[in-house]
Image: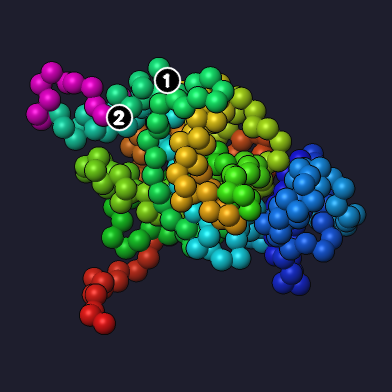
Amino acid sequence: MQLAQARIESGDRVVLAIDDDPRQARRLEGVESVHALALTALDRKVGLAALTKEWPGDARIDAVALSDQGRLLAPLDHPDPAHLLVTGTGLTHLGSAEGRDKMHRQMNEADQSEQPLTDSMKMFRKGLDGGKPAPGDFGVQPEWFYKGDGGIVMAPGEALRMPHFALDGGEEPEVAGLYLIDNDGVPRRIGYALGNEFSDHVTERENYLYLAHSKLRACSFGPTLLLDELPEDIQGTSRIRRGDEVLWEKPFISGEANMCHSLANLEAHHFKYAQFCRPGDIHVHFFGTATLSFSDGISAQPGDEFEIDAKPFALPLRNPLAKDATAPVPSVKPL
């Protein structure tokens, strides 16, 4: 079972339930957001998937056509974007350290005669050794980063915009976990979505301490939200289209079978912080990737389109790349 949100031709927001065929999505009556549906599930003390199955509504809508028309929205949002937090983890997938390690070796090769392990490779090896603890235990901490609040989330089909000062705008094909904090401060996983975490890899390559800067960018996830358990082995494709041509294409993998951390460990190390358990907040947490076009020497340009596709997600995630016009240096004035 998957959910999607859209704005139809009348201007109304709708919630769609997708079983197998996205061309036969079922419109849920009387509800305009997955957020509202999730709150109802909490109030009724039932699972979201069970509630969706019994929710009234027989009208069928072609979600593929809505995607082609640019009418699909992010599959989860919050009425107040400040109460949606976007974060992520890195170096979590088998093979994910290779590109990062190469990047940092190139940066420091002039003064590394003995080529010691980079911090990236050390972190990756720690994950291999202790990233999948027994249930109820903390494993090794993953790399963690903050991206922004709901204001940085672009809908499927909407442009991922590079700030005018950005040095790069590169895709990061990932799976994201989507969560709602209940009234008792307990994180409740709503489901999973495909995501393009989108980062500035040239800025990161300049100095690893610029990682935080490189992550303060837009992102996109969806178009659908998977309510079922995430398969252990996800096989997908990430590609960049330039005009009518495919500029770059490569398989990407996710799921715990392809990771050096368990999802439970990544979740535990995020939600161990009390400030991330504020009732009513929504969290979108990216789980990381091992596949980047940047690692293959590709530099995406404004007008290119990123496309990420993987089963079991019913629809691909597509976003063009754009760049903001030059803006003046911010000037802070005394009050």
**Among the two numbered marks 1 and 2 on one chain, the one whose residue lies closer to the N terminus:** 2
**Given the image, on which type of amino acid does mark 2 rest?**
Ser
Q: Nearer the viewer, residue 106 or 277?
A: 277
Mark 1 surroundings within 10 Å by alpha-carbon count, few (fewer than 14), some (14 through 19), many (20 or more): some
- In-image side of 210 versus 236 (left or right): left
**Given the image, on which type of amino acid does mark 1 rest?**
Gly
Q: Nearer the viewer, residue 1 or 313?
A: 1
Real-space Cα separation, disc 1 to disc 2, in angstroms? 15 Å
Q: Residue at x 40, y 49 (%)?
A: 146
Question: Would residue 113 be counted in the magenta stretch?
Answer: yes
Q: Nearer the viewer, residue 138 or 96?
A: 138
Q: State which quarter of the image contains the N terminus.
A: top right
Residue 62 in percent (x, y) is at 78, 53
Q: Which mark is residue 18?
A: none
Q: Is residue 327 above or below residue 322?
A: below
Residue holding disc 1 = 130
Residue holding disc 2 = 120
Q: Residue at x 78, y 45 (%)?
A: 46
The span shown in magenta is 110-121
